Image: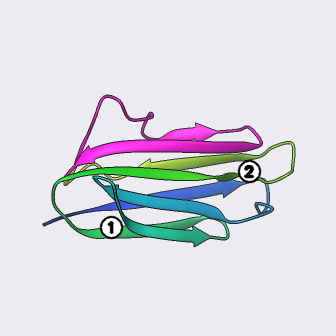
Amino acid sequence: MASTTLKVKVFGGTPPFSLKIMLFKGNDVVKNINKPGSFEMTLDDLSGNYSLIVSGPNPMSGDRKTIISLDETEITLSPDSDPNPATRTGKVYMVQYFFKA
């Protein structure tokens, strides 16, 4: 079984509401997590094809940005995935990764 680490680093303050992380295997939601800001988490016991969505608001400041990255040591990202790492500077964002473990 494979694992990967998701890192989300928020700059420019605190987001006005939680970030949402959803991990899908096929059509099934495997994880549905909310985080208040920057975090790092390990996704364990992975086997098969997955879709990972990270979405949320950036802080309200002018220098706002969020950097999302996924460790590719034990997984293979699909070319259809967003860039890894992904930097988002707008008011809100959604990043999607497709991978095989």
Residue visible at 42% across and 39% down in the picture: 84
Instruction: Give, as a single range, the part of the protein colored magenta.
Output: 76-101
Q: Is residue 31 left or right of residue 78?
A: right
Looking at the figure, which quarter contains the N terminus?
bottom left
Residue visible at 16% across and 60% down in the picture: 47
Query: Residue 90: x percent and y percent?
Result: 74, 37
Query: Residue 37: x percent and y percent?
Result: 66, 66
Per the image, label 2 sits on a secondary structure element best described as loop
Label 2 crowd (10 A; few <14 / some 14-19 / many >=20):
many
In this view, 33 is above or below 79: below
| Disc on the earlier residue, 2 or 1 | 1
Q: Residue furthest right?
A: 61
Looking at the rendered structure, the kind of residue marked 1 is Leu
Query: Residue 95: x percent and y percent?
Result: 52, 43
Please tell me in which quadrant of the rendered image residue 28 appears: bottom left
Foreground of the two, 11 or 98: 98
Query: Which residue in the structure is indicated by mark 2?
Result: 58
Label drawn at residue 43: 1
How is this picture coloured? rainbow
Looking at the rendered structure, the kind of residue marked 2 is Asn
In this view, 101 is above or below 85: below
Query: Residue 12: x percent and y percent?
Result: 78, 53
Foreground of the two, 63 or 3: 3
